Amino acid sequence: MREKGQDRFIRLAEARVERAIKHIRLIGNLADRSNYDYTEEQAAAIIGALRREVADCRARFGTARRPKRSESFRLPVKRQR
């Protein structure tokens, strides 16, 4: 029997959102300065990239128009002293 659109949406949405939350929490673990060394610029780049993707997702749910996909995420390289 073919899965109905609403049932498929719920199944996929729950699994994908759960994975996204897990990965966001893992990204948050990178903030632990006892384990990682990063610049404020790098931290801001991570937060900015996540905010842009959430804004794009929100726009897709609000309109039929698809926003332009952002490029691959790359952190600014920490300058050596």
Image (cartoon, rainbow, N blue to C red):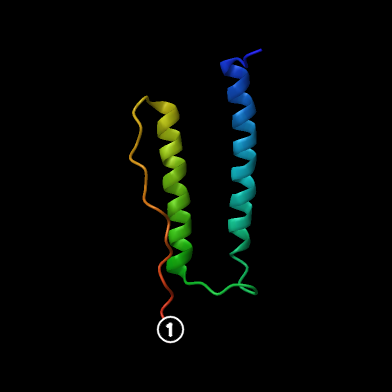
Q: Measuring 58% from the left and 24% from the top, which residue is drawn there?
A: 9
Q: Nearer the viewer, residue 35 or 5?
A: 5
On the image, the x and y values in percent for residue 32 come to 63, 68
On the image, the x and y values in percent for residue 36 come to 59, 72
**58 in relation to 48, above or below:** above
Q: Measuring 45% from the left and 34% from the top, which residue is drawn there?
A: 58
Q: Label 1 belongs to which residue?
A: 80
Q: Measuring 63% from the left and 56% from the top, which residue is drawn there?
A: 26
**47 in relation to 79, above or below:** above
Amino acid on which disc 1 is placed:
Gln
On the image, the x and y values in percent for residue 22 come to 64, 48
Q: Measuring 60% from the left and 38% from the top, which residue is drawn there?
A: 17
Q: Quadrant of the C terminus?
A: bottom left
**45 in relation to 59, above or below:** below
On the image, the x and y values in percent for residue 66 come to 35, 32
Report whether 13 appears left or right of 57.
right
